[in-house]
Structure formats: structure tokens, C-alpha cells
Amino acid sequence: MPLDTLFIFLDEGGNFDFSNKGSEYFTLTSVATTRPFVFATPLIDLRCSLLESGLNLEYFHAAEDRQAIRDKVFGVISSHMTAMRFDSVIVKKRMTMPSLHVEEKFYPKMLGCLLRYVMNGCEGQYSHIVVMTDSIPVKRKKDAIEKAVRLQLSQQITTKTPYNIYHHASKSSVGLQVADYVNWAIGRKWERGDTRSYDIIKPSLKSEFDIFQHGSKAWY
């Protein structure tokens, strides 16, 4: 029997501002699943129902959606979580060494840390791995970040299973929209102590790694 392809959808939260004006935490979360994506049709149906009701909703985005919409989306996610696995890396930014205070170094490093954990346990289980992130918005840094991501993954990931990484607009993928919602729930917990949405997604949260839990140099 042929092996499935594993899809890993990624989303990040917080910002790359390491001053006192920036977010306290940076979160990077993955949603891993195989086809068929059981959440896809219910989310498409939900969006169509909202359009029919007169709401001009192009795609789901947790930070921008109204709470009533978030409740419905989390309802779909919670109904299909057994087919998904969530993992997250948490970074307390004030503990990050100054040498990583640039996107081209910080983002690939954290991405490599998360994917190393998720992907290295996949050897022999899947025929292929497809990793999708949201589009990199800063055009002048896009090439530099993508190059750094490829280098970081080649250094950290030991799996022999072939994989590709793509950067697509989240509006093009319900998988990326689910990752956005899951990461938003985790970010709310860490930034504000608000666990309302976190408690919904927690059953499928396999790891929630606080990178600096043992000090700023323990991970490096």
C-alpha cells in the first residue's frame, strides 16, 4: 500500500520587533495532517453560508474575524482534531540573543527547530512531506529568508523522506487558515493568559516547547 504524503501547515504569531514596543512572545505553530483534509469542506461550507448571509468574508483570519465567526471556526476545528497534530515553539523574545535580532536569522532558526522535531519522527511513515507557510510579506527579504530556511533545514533535519517547502498566501489554503487559528489560540494564552480558545485545541497539541525555559543559552 502506498504511503501518504504528510502536509505541514505553519503560522507564526507576534512580531520581529525585539524592543519594548514589540510583542513579548513569538510563536510558531504547525498543523500536520494527511489527505483528505477533513476540515476543508466544512470550512468552505461555513464561508459560503457567511457569504449568503451578507458577510463579505474572503478567508478566515483569527485576529481579524469577529468572535462569533471564531466560535464557528473553532467548532469545525474541534470536530476534526483527531485527524490533525499540533506542535508549537514559544520564544520569549527578550531572552533572544542580539545576534538573532534580524528576521533572516531568527525566523529560519525557529522554523528549523520546530520542523526538526515534527519531521524527524516521520521516517518511513510517509512517502513525501509538504511544508507550507504563509507568504513572506517583505519582498526585499524574501529571497534571503528562503535561502536561510533551506540552509537551516538541511543542517537540522535528518529525515531521508523527501520534502518541499512552499510559501503561499494563507487565503489560498484552508490548511494555513487552520494553522493561523491554532497559533492564535496559543499566542493568546502566552501573551494574555487567555485560554478560552487554547482549551479547545489543546487535545491535539502534542508539543508546546518554550525554547528558553532553561535560560537564554540553554538552547543554543
Image (cartoon, grey):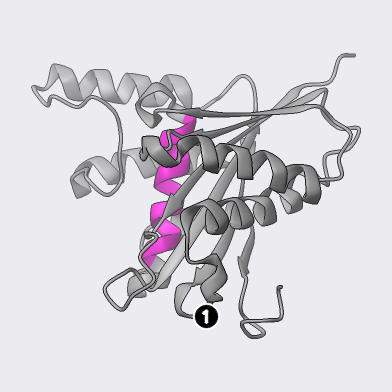
Q: Residue at x 39, y 22 (%)?
A: 172
Query: Which quadrant would the C terminus be assigned to in this image?
Result: bottom right
Under tag 1, what secondary structure? helix
Left or right placement of residue 100 versus residue 139 in this view: right
User: Callout 1: few (<14), some (14-19), or many (20+) C-alpha neighbours within 10 Å?
Assistant: some
Q: In front: 5, or 49?
A: 5
Left or right placement of residue 71 versus residue 75 in this view: left
Q: In front: 39, or 153?
A: 153
Residue 76 visible: no
Q: Residue at x 40, y 46 (%)?
A: 181
Q: Residue at x 39, y 54 (%)?
A: 184
**What amino acid type is highlighted by mark number 1?**
Met
- The residue identified by callout 1 is 95
- Extreme bottom residue here? 215
Residue 141 visible: yes
Q: Residue at x 41, y 44 (%)?
A: 180
Q: Position of residue 136 (x, y in %)?
A: 43, 37
Using the image, determine if residue 67 lies above or below residue 138: below
Instruction: Say whether residue 181 is magenta.
Output: yes
Q: Quadrant of residue 185?
A: bottom left
Q: In front: 98, or 90?
A: 98
Using the image, determine if residue 220 lies above or below residue 104: below
Using the image, determine if residue 120 lies above or below residue 110: above
Boundaries of the magenta span: 175-188
Instruction: Say whether residue 109 is magenta.
Output: no
Q: Position of residue 21 (x, y in %)?
A: 26, 73
Q: Position of residue 34 (x, y in %)?
A: 67, 27
Left or right placement of residue 166 versus residue 5 in this view: left
- Extreme left residue here? 54
Q: Position of residue 140 (x, y in %)?
A: 39, 38
